[in-house]
């Protein structure tokens, strides 16, 4: 751009732009030297191109046009070299020569009707053909209106031409020049700025440096050679922080089916859906094996570097196949715990209903426990407000969450069935949320 404000606006665009995809390369070369020579005669719009560069798609006049274009859109200043010196013309040429430019994956059979913008280009031309046709049309318009081809225009004139094209003020009866610029040229320019330098543009990662991007792992291939097969420096003396097992471990208990850790990292709850004890409440008979897959939760606390089991927690109405512990959540301070039991079978609804009922298999429940000091107790038995609507089992408690994990001090719990999310607030009546499980993140 010409004046300081426009140049700043152009740089603001570069700072806000993101990385774009790239395509592979194809052969068939034209020398960049001849194109650069044509452009160099054009009053300073184009800059010299490194001798090693070759063009795979663009002819000499087309290359001169693209070099002039990228220099107008990315002028040399204190932030970056010129567009040509940044490799932008090389990148664009390679994309036109590769699968993208050849139209790989594009539908190329008619009829070609005007479609919605989101449907993309509706043309019989490949991107390469469209780009070259546009170059010829713009050059013809420049000769007609300004007396010289695009590459021979002064920088201010060339910039004005591009603005007019983008806004639809320069037209051609054979093709849409606004579409040519906005759908082909401009996206390729953005990609050229922010693609991996291995594809020809963004030389020396100049645009990545401008926005503070550190680079792709591919750029660290030398590190793979240097460090492959060698241990990480900090792993010379690896050690396990803790190896934790249930106090009544046995085959198929599935200890660790679910795990929740408090925000301060000092309390951990472990769900064990296959545990078989018929015990109820806190610290009951762990040696019992009469209720297959009733499930249990083990609470551990950390003091210094040592973990110890604090509680063995069972449902207040534990029975076989309840799968207590199928979901878990701990509050930030570890003093409130929600436990889902997807196989629980009471037909009760709401909070603290009839736990003795077993008429609704797989309806599911959530149990809320609180800790005072080191003692745990069950505070609530929670059921869906519409228990039994699904014939194949609601599985209420399939997922459980505590909002205090996200915002300390908010005593709000979310419970999910296979189909809907429900939100419960401690100290008030329950409320039913109509959002589906897919949308449940909106509830907390």
Image (spheres, rainbow, N blue to C red):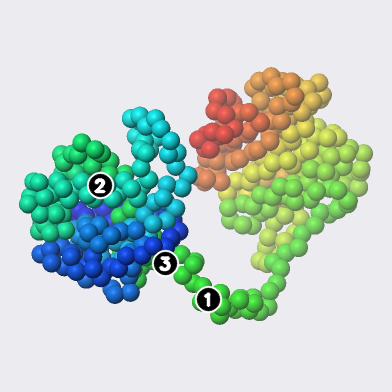
Mark 3 / mark 1, whichever is N-terminal: 3
Query: Residue at position x 25%, y 62% from top?
Result: 60
Q: Residues within 10 Å of mark 3 (few under 14, many from 20)?
A: few
**Quadrant of the rendered structure where residue 83 is?**
bottom left
Determine whether label 3 and label 2 are within 8 Å by CB: no
Relative vertical location of residue 75 with respect to residue 251 in this rendering, above or below: below
Relative vertical location of residue 197 with respect to residue 344 in this rendering, above or below: below
Mark 2 / mark 1, whichever is N-terminal: 2
Instruction: Tell whether 382 sits left or right of 140.
Output: right
**Quadrant of the rendered structure where residue 387 is?**
top right
The residue beneath circle 3 is: 198
Expressed as whole percent of the image width and height from the top left, the position of residue 402 reads: 59, 41
Q: Nearer the viewer, residue 399 or 73?
A: 73
Secondary structure, mark 2, is helix
Q: Nearer the viewer, residue 133 or 5?
A: 133
The residue beneath circle 2 is: 134
Expressed as whole percent of the image width and height from the top left, the position of residue 316 reads: 78, 34
Q: Nearer the viewer, residue 150 or 395?
A: 150
Relative vertical location of residue 258 with respect to residue 119 in this rendering, above or below: below
Secondary structure, mark 3, is helix
Instruction: Tell whether 286 sits left or right of 74.
Output: right
Secondary structure, mark 1, is helix
Expressed as whole percent of the image width and height from the top left, the position of residue 372 reads: 67, 46
Query: Residue at position x 49%, y 67% from top?
Result: 218
Any part of residue 381 in sight: no
Q: Where's the N terminus, which quadrant?
A: bottom left
């Amino acid at each position: 751009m010409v004046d300081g404000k426009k140049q700043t606006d152009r740089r603001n665009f570069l700072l806000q732009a993101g990385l774009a995809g790239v395509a592979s390369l194809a052969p068939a070369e034209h020398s960049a030297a001849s194109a650069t020579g044509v452009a160099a005669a054009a009053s300073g719009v184009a800059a010299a191109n490194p001798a090693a560069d070759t063009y795979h798609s663009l002819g000499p006049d087309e290359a001169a046009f693209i070099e002039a274009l990228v220099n107008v859109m990315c002028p040399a200043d204190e932030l970056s070299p010129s567009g040509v010196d940044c490799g932008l013309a090389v990148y664009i040429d390679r994309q036109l020569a590769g699968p993208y430019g050849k139209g790989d994956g594009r539908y190329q059979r008619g009829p070609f009707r005007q479609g919605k913008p989101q449907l993309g280009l509706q043309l019989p031309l490949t991107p390469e053909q469209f780009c070259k046709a546009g170059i010829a049309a713009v050059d013809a318009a420049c000769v007609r209106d300004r007396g010289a081809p695009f590459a021979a225009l002064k920088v201010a004139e060339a910039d004005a031409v591009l603005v007019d094209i983008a806004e639809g003020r320069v037209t051609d009866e054979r093709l849409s020049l606004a579409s040519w610029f906005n759908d082909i040229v401009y996206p390729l320019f953005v990609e050229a700025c922010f693609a991996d330098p291995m594809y020809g543009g963004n030389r020396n990662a100049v645009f990545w440096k401008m926005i503070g991007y550190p680079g792709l792992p591919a750029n660290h291939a030398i590190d793979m050679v240097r460090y492959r097969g060698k241990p990480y420096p900090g792993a010379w003396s690896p050690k396990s922080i803790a190896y934790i097992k249930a106090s009544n471990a046995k085959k198929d208990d599935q200890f660790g089916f679910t795990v929740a850790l408090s925000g301060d990292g000092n309390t951990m709850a472990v769900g064990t859906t296959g545990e078989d004890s018929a015990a109820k409440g806190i610290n009951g008979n762990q040696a019992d094996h009469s209720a297959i897959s009733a499930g249990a939760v083990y609470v551990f606390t950390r003091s210094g570097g040592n973990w110890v089991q604090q509680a063995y927690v069972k449902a207040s109405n534990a029975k076989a196949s309840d799968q207590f512990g199928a979901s878990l959540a701990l509050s930030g301070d570890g003093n409130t715990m929600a436990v889902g039991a997807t196989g629980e079978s009471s037909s009760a609804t709401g909070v603290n209903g009839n736990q003795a009922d077993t008429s609704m298999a797989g309806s599911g429940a959530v149990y809320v426990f609180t800790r005072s000091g080191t003692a745990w107790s069950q505070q609530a038995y929670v059921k869906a407000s519409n228990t039994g609507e699904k014939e194949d089992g609601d599985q209420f408690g399939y997922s459980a969450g505590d909002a205090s994990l996200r915002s300390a001090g908010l005593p709000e719990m979310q419970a999910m069935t296979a189909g809907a999310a429900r939100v419960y607030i401690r100290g008030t009546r329950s409320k039913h949320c109509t959002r589906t499980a897919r949308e449940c993140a909106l509830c907390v």
